[in-house]
Image: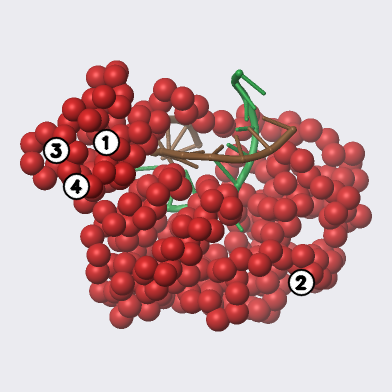
Chain colours: A red, B brown, C green
Amino acid sequence: MSDLHQPVLRWYAEHQRDLPWRRPGTSAWSVMVSEFMLQQTPVVRVLPVHEAWLERWPTPTALADEPAGEAVRAWGRLGYPRRALRLHAAATVIRDAHGGIVPDTYDELLALPGVGDYTAAAIASFAFGRRHVVLDTNVRRVLARTLAGAEFPAPAVNKAERELAGSVLPDADEDAAVWAVATMELGAVVCTAARPACERCPVVDLCAWHAAGRPAYDGPARKVQDYAGTDRQCRGRLLGVVRDADGAVPRGRLEAEWHLAEQRDRALAGLLTDGLLVEPEPGYYALP
DNA sequence: GAAGCGTGGCC
DNA sequence: TGGCCAAGCTT
């Protein structure tokens, strides 16, 4: 048993945030919806959308029975709206192939649209208490600091990192599941990227990075995305026009939204290819 | 393995 | 101000 276990688990028991998808009796569907929404998106922005989503679609089948466009509209401004399409597609698979019940194994979850290694492990662990290495950006940062003595983990997960994470995973299923959410929480609220609050950390005295004097990251450059002026921004603007409209929008409305014709046409084509928009009649665009 | 994919808040 | 960051997935 790692020396980190007891202080981290004790800290989590006392300091965990009260989040809807963590409450006792929460459905696996609620957990699944939260995991989709939390991919690359802060908790505070997910909270209201998650609440409205679960009220409107309390089960996967309820969502699957509506057009995908309703999911895109309800997604609002969470960002990366393809996640809404994938969540709808996953709900459809659950309805048609799993009897409307969220599957409880990693492999079945991983097979769902929009579910990768992290999300499959997270749902299996948080909703079903199964033992998995749950490697998100928070856990990776906590382990990089406490165990590897580095400010940040490598740009991509490698075999050594995964084995290291597995080596400190508690043996019992239930302990492992709590460990996973506890290390995530520690990374989210204490061992943060920009301003780690080491004075509030339950394992500061065991932390290799702190012991080394908190040396600055010296690995490969970490990628930072541009946004202003990119195709992504253009797509967001165009989709926003349709999302906030009633019914199909004429092409002129989109042309007025983004004046660089070449980029606008490329973005529009991409939205159609991705299925975020459809063209019900020539020159008109709507949600699917 | 790199690139593409939204949005908003913070310092 | 603008770079940085936020529970990744797909191609």
Which callout, 3 or 4, points to the residue nearer the camera? Answer: 4
* Rendered position, A82 above or below A177: above
Q: Which disc is residue A197 wearing?
A: none
User: Which element is circle 3 on?
Assistant: strand
Name which of mark 1 and mark 4 comes first in the sequence: 4
Q: Which disc is residue A247 wearing?
A: 4
Q: Spatial distance from mark 3 to mark 4, Cα to Cα?
A: 9 Å
Q: Spatial distance from mark 4 to mark 2, Cα to Cα?
A: 48 Å
On the rendered structure, is A225 left or right of A15?
left
Q: Spatial distance from mark 1 to mark 2, Cα to Cα?
A: 46 Å
Q: Amino acid at mark 3?
A: Tyr
In this figure, which residue is indicated by the disc labeled 3?
A284
Q: Is residue A46 visible?
A: yes
In this figure, which residue is indicated by the disc labeled 2?
A13
Q: Position of residue A36 (x, y in %)?
A: 46, 57
Q: Do callouts 4 and 2 point to residues on the same chain?
A: yes
